[in-house]
Amino acid sequence: MSQRVPVHVEVNGRGYDREVEPRRTLADFLREDLGLKGTHVACEHGFCGNCNVLLDGAAIRSCLMFAVQAGGRSVETVESLAGSDGELDELQLAFTEHHALQCGFCTPAMLLTAKQFLRENPGVTDARRIREAINGVICRCTGYQQIVAAIAAVAQAQQTAHSIRIETAPPVRVAQDTR
Amino acid sequence: MSVGRLEGIEQHPAAARIATETALKEAGRRWVGKSMNRVEDPRLLRGEGRYIDDITLPGMAHAAVLRSPHAHARIVSIDISRAERLPGVIKVLTGADVAATAAPLPSFGAGPIIQDMIAVEKVRHYGETVAAVVAEDRYIAEDACDLIEVQYEPLPVVLDPFAAQREDAPRVHEKLGSNVAYERTFTFGDVDGEFAAAEHVVRAELNWPRSTGMPMDTNGAIGDYDRGTGVVTIYANSMSFTYFHWLIAGSLKIPASKLKVVPVAAGGSFGSKFFMHKVPTFAGWLSMATGRPVKFIEDRITHIASNDHCGSDRFYDAELAFDADGTLRALRIDCVDDYGAYLQFGTGTHGNGLSQIVGPYRIGHVQYSLHAVLTNKNQQGAYRGFGAEVSNWMLERLVDMAARELGMDRIELRRRNLIAPDQFPYRTPTGNIYDSGNYPAVLDRLLELADYEHWVAERDKARTEGRHLGIGVVASNERSVFSSTEFWFWFDQPDFTPTASPESASLQIDPTGQIVVTLHSQAQWGNSPETVVAQVVAEEFDVDPTSVVVTYADSQHALPGTGPGGSRYTVMVSGAVAGAATQVKEKIKRIAAHQLEANENDLQFRDGGIEVAGSPDQRLALADVALSAYMFRLDLPADLESGLAAQSTYDHPLTTVPSEDRSDLGIFYPFVGHAWHLAVVEVDVETGKLEFLHYCAVHDAGTVVNPKTLTGQIIGGTIQGLGSALYEEYRYDEQGRLRNETFEHYHLPSSLDVPTMTVAHQETPSPYTPYGIKGAGEGGRMLTPAILSAAIEDALEPYGVRVTSLPITAEQIVAWAAAPAGGDAR
Ligand code: FES
Ligand code: FES
């Protein structure tokens, strides 16, 4: 096969240097090369969003991006959410409280997509806005209603702690459109 | 056989009660009935669900398949030499290898309808596997598939299930001599007499097209052949391997004792992983052929084009006879079902529908004719509802038509025909019974919750403003817990007549007092087996449910099991766990009575221990009892052995054998829930877009184990039904090529397409099941197709639209509005 090329990617705050085939998808790179199995592929053709990860803070389809395209950039996967002892973060807790997951397959992508929404729109509880934000992630189990409720619950909690959140939110940059 | 109240079976007072914490307390329970967060969730939320593709074995290779571009063609030759030479390719296999080393896949179907893992001699549908590549990685395996050269001789294609029945139609299976795999007419009661006597008859041709469960996680397996022991280990996300692993062994030509199927969690099934045998068999076979562990996971296109689990594809000619006062009298149904190229489950999906063919209504006479036809399409399998969702849509369409014919309110017509609370257990014309219910109470609750009158006024007002609001109100029963007779009562001399569908559990309290339950059929797939088990154990032992550990046995260590399907699992696993718990509790009581010098009858389980009722200081923690049970034999009553474990197999609690002449199909699906939905939609006739103004659902699934997760199942199922109603249909072109094999062209409901629902639960406990639970995993999907048909029809009343086929696409709505039909549409 084609020559491997070196790539440096920051994933969940840690830098990785690897050699990959240019055609290797970011999803396969995360799952197979880094062992981060929380990123799931369900269609591999860009329509279900189950493979979403955050690239420089914005949700992208990791099945449609090559690992080399993520070179020099920063990726967040579902593994970044819980504490090192496995303690769930507030969004994850809201998901279980509202029964926002059944099989759990779409859940990592839902969480990350919601994470971006909540960072960019802290305190926004409007169901329509939330539905628009997660529209690119297909869930076959839940019918979405409880997912919307879970995200809204976190947004509600943000309203009281709004200023703190703005300060601690990472800078948001617009990812290049890879679709 | 008479229809109606069943004598000889204990009658249950059909008290409907609302599922609340108060009801829970009244029932004397603490955990079964309590809304609790799922114990499965934390690992899934962390991305640690350990689905099939997350598992990697040392030295593991990867497989990809080449799919047929033809719907029907003879395989003239296959040249694999270029593929074999590609670096990284381990082996390329074709139908010739299958024919030489494996037996056909298992099938419950009639006649010589043989399906192989890879097509031998000819392909019978677009997407059928013609070759497989095993390589060092998936990229190379897929590259190599492109290098395989297959020469096909295209054969005439048969796609239309009516044309397929003609004498001169091309044969899908030559050895069958016809494309009609099976035909039969069942008559229950005096159908002709009732039709002759009835004052009205409505008749409709209805079409329900094939769609599929489409889980986000496709079907996958890893085969791992150990040449030393001869054992083939298969990790698979199949749901029900305990029931059929011996059949996989048959396909692999190995003794069942040399096969070990290890259950792996699935990212959704909805039927697609029910009796899922092809993919695990394939992975096991590839491992045997290469001597390497081999992972085979369907990619999405393989899952769509080549999976074996399409839903029904039916053409009904259906009639309903009724009187001017609204009394529904008889049903006459003729159904052509396009099964596709194979018939793995026989005609079980129609057997399923016959369990509740009269719905919640007192219809006393039924005739049902089935023509199961083979065509050059993907074969059918299971999809949430297993055929009963289709017959329910058909029935509710007929009832809406009857209401229109009589000029009677749809709800009033239904109400007049509901089986009354004092008629349970109720025998339906086919012989299946409904165990319990209070149908009017569910309806009343819906009307109250949905504020029906308000929406009628809104609709009428909108109509005067030229807006198109429509209301749908439909009912459904939800049969749960199958025995297996629905698969074979079609045949006078069936080859195989199973009547068992057990579920088992093992329960152990380890020496530290930790309760461990082992399940024997599946790993979770989106349902909540571990939470259900935890709740039952908590109920039985009065322990914290989150402390209960649940594990899954592999097939070499499994007790009898059947797996989730037909809304059976919660009922059956609860029975098995309660059975094992009872045995362990007995032993604990004996030990505690001995050690506390107390009377067994005075002991109660409380808060992780056992104590003398009324004197909590006379108490042993479960850990104390467990330790002495394992380590201090001489502290036990003399006749007890060491250890603290039990296993229990729970069989279907209420099933009977069909009569010889099949005038009575027996009791085969008796725990029957009930539901009503109400939807209000606004239709934009310019764009065909629907907006949901209101959606309300009330379900009675007997005793609710966990209201939170049951609500989740209802909403999820309802939205899946919305997909079937509005978007989903496999479309084949005239050459039989599937035209929508990607998510770009097969639209699944997204977050913006769906309503926010109000869901409420009623409870009419089953008198026959543990705690009175009824199954409820499929209920939602049983209603949405009918309710959306009704609501859209109502909204488009000015155009005289009649919905007789699905899906009701936006294009269809626009076309209707542009050219008012004033009669049957499509
Ligand atoms: S896996 Fe479906 S969009 Fe990437
Ligand atoms: S929880 Fe199963 S796909 Fe979303």
Image (tube, coloured by chain):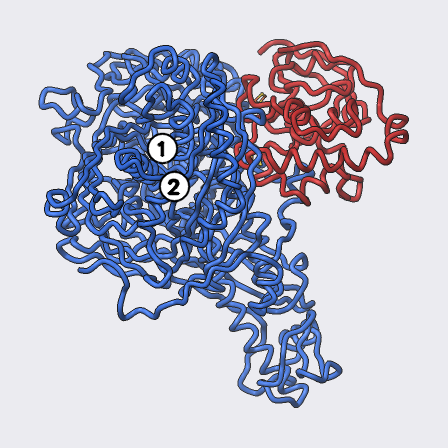
Res B476 label? none
* Chain A drawn colour: red
Task: Tell me whether marks 1 and 2 sit on the same chain.
Answer: yes
Q: Chain of mark 1?
A: B
Chain letter, blue in picture:
B
Labels 1 and 2 touching (C-beta < 8 A): yes
Dot label at residue B311: 1
Observer-side mark, 1 or 2, equals 2
Quarter containing the C terminus of chain B: top left
Mark 2, secondary structure of its residue: loop
Chain of the residue under the numbered disc 2 shown in the image: B
Where residue B823 sits, quadrant-wise, is top left
Residue A123 on image: x %, y %: 79, 30
Q: Residue B586 falls in which quadrant of the image?
A: bottom right
The N terminus of chain B sits in image quarter: bottom left
- Residue at the (60%, 29%) spot, across then down: A40
The reply to whether residue B417 is visible in this rendering is: yes
Reading the image, the residue beneath label 2 is B385
